[in-house]
Each structure stands twice: as structure tokens, then as C-alpha cells.
Image: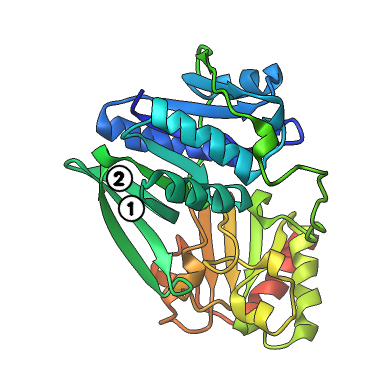
Amino acid sequence: MSGVFVIAEHRQGKVVESTYEGITCGEKIAEALGCEVKVILLCSGDSSLKDEILRYAGKVISVEDECLENFTSSAYSAFLTKFIDEYGSGAIFVAPHTSFGMELIPSLSAHTGIPCITDVIDVGVEGGSLKVRRNCYNGKVIAEYSVDASRGVFLTFRTGVYEQASQKDSPGGVEKIEIDIDSRSFPVEFVEYREAPAGEVDITQAPILLSIGRGIKDQDNIPRVMEVAEKMGAVLACSRPVVDKKWLGRERQVGTSGKTVKPKAYIAMGISGAFQHVAGIKGAGAFIAVNRDPKAPIFRVADYGVVEDMFKVLDALKEKLES
């Protein structure tokens, strides 16, 4: 059963959206290798999870056990290790680079001896080799890796890099795989979910982002930008220097050390355009940059550029919105 397998992530009875990004990543690999993508769903038998995934995937491999209702690395790793031994030799396994994938994939790699590459930002196939790119040294270096695809490999991809898969015209099928493991031997037991405190905003879901950088000059100027953002229905975001000064929370940071975003419109004001920041913007519908320096690197990647003091542009934009 070799091919490309996407390991589904679900939480509290719902499929996590990164699973659908994983299907897009897997389809890109599968198309180049001439094989199909299958989604592995480890669960307690919840039919709603299967039905939801089938809307986006051609085939779902269902591994069911009561201990798989909630994720624990020990249970998932044990079931997947046995699945790989029996069915997945030489396959490519894809999972999101979330807390789920970061805990599970290195463990699987250690148990199976299959190499793993984490936090991938691009993937392709050249000849018989899988080619991937990932950031290193806090985004200062982009490293390229090559691995023999026939050996099998584990990948975790950075969320936000790939678009979510489109719904299929016709639903796929489910294949149930029986794996017999004594769950009483697992050292970790799921107790309960405790959600981390939510950030003030989720910039990854915002259709319009108004982002600020060093050009904001002072924390007292932020309310001016916030007012304009609210009037235009945008969410305020920022580059790393603003977070380092503790003027805005990290949940608003765009970039390799922040979040990857793909809004319909991204307006960057007073941001120079360091590659660490630009790398966090994927597929924006319109990228607009405002900077008083005509040689600012951000103008190389923006769709539209305005060489002007950001506060003059803000005042003009506010006046236009109010009228």
C-alpha cells in the first residue's frame, strides 16, 4: 500500500483545518510520483470525521480503537508503526507542523528508522528524489534537502503555506484496517483538554491585514493605525521589531518567527521587507507597501508601492474612509 499518506489531525470531534492543507501538499507529491493520496484517520470509529474528510479526499484509511478518540503520541505512534510495518513500506507520510505533528512524527521516525524532515515550506519531486525546502536559523537560511522517495519519508509542513484542498465532485471510499494492540501498555493516558488562552486575534483568518513595522516609531502611534484598520474592516498585524518592543502581542506577528498569512489584501506600512517577514506572506490577493524609502526591499515583492510617510497615507486613508 505504498503511496502518499496524509495523517489526519482531529480534536474534540472535529477535523483540524491543517489536514486539508496536508491533502494539497500530498497531492502535489503524488501527482509527480504518479500515485494517489490517502488520508489515514486514527479514531474511535466516529463516522462524522470520515464523512467530513471524504468530501476532500479520494480515499480514507480508517484505523479504529477506543484509545484513538483523543491524540496521545504513544498510542498514535504504536498504531502507525504497526501500520507502516504491514502496509506502508516505502510510502511518504505527511502531517502538519503543529503540536500534533511535532510530537508524533519524530517519534515515528525513531521507531521505524524512516527519515523525517520537519517544518517544510516547499516540496517537489526531481527524478526519483523528493526535494524539500525549509527555513533554518530563525529564517535566515533556506535549506534544501533531497531524499530517495522509494525509501519512504516523514514530512511535517508549515501550516498556512498550502491552500486547503478543494471539495471532490464525488465522495471517495473508506478502507478500514484492523490493527491489534493492547492499549493498556501505553505510558500516557488522555485526561482532558485544556485550551491555551486564545490570542486577541487570529491573523491567519483575516481577509484584510494592515501591518506595521519600525516606521510606527512609537507605541503611542498604534491607536492611530488601529482606528484606520477598524474603519476599513482590517485586522492589525506587525513585523517582529514591534513585538520585540512589546508594543503588540506575538499573535499579531507575521513572518518566519510569527505566523504565515494569506489574506485577500495585505497592506504593509513602515515595514522594510526583510525576507523573514516576507516569507510569512503567502498568496495575498493584493500586496500593498507604504514606505518612505524608495529602496526598501519590500517594494521588490509588493504588487503596489507608495513612497511616502506612512502617517500621511494613514491620514488620507482615514479621511477617505470617513467620507
Label 1 packing within 10 angstroms: few (<14), some (14-19), many (20+) = many
Q: Residue at x 70, y 64 (%)?
A: 251
For the residue pair 161 and 178, the one nearer the viewer reads as 178
Report the side of 13 relative to 93 (left or right): right
How was this image coloured?
Answer: rainbow
In the picture, the quarter occupied by the N terminus is top left
- Disc 2 marks which residue? 124
The correct choice, above or below, for 69 with respect to 97 in the image is: above
For the residue pair 201 and 6, the one nearer the viewer reads as 6
Mark number for residue 132?
Answer: 1
Disc 2 is placed on an element classified as: strand
Return the x and y of residue 196 as percentages of the image width and height: 79, 56
Return the x and y of residue 142 as percentages of the image width and height: 36, 67
Disc 2 marks a residue whose amino acid type is Gly
Asked whether residue 285 is in view, the answer is: no
Q: Residue at x 51, y 32 (%)?
A: 165
- Which quadrant of the figure has residue 259? bottom right
Label 2 packing within 10 angstroms: few (<14), some (14-19), many (20+) = some
For the residue pair 36 and 180, the one nearer the viewer reads as 180
Q: Residue at x 76, y 42 (%)?
A: 190
Disc 1 marks a residue whose amino acid type is Val
Residue farthest along the bottom direction in this orientation: 217
Asked whether residue 145 is in view, the answer is: yes
Return the x and y of residue 160 as percentages of the image width and height: 54, 50
Q: How many marks?
A: 2
Q: CA distance from mark 1 to mark 2?
A: 6 Å
Q: Pointers 1 and 2 in contact (CB under 8 A)?
A: yes
In the picture, the quarter occupied by the C terminus is bottom right
Return the x and y of residue 123 as percentages of the image width and height: 35, 48
The correct choice, above or below, for 234 with respect to 165 in the image is: below
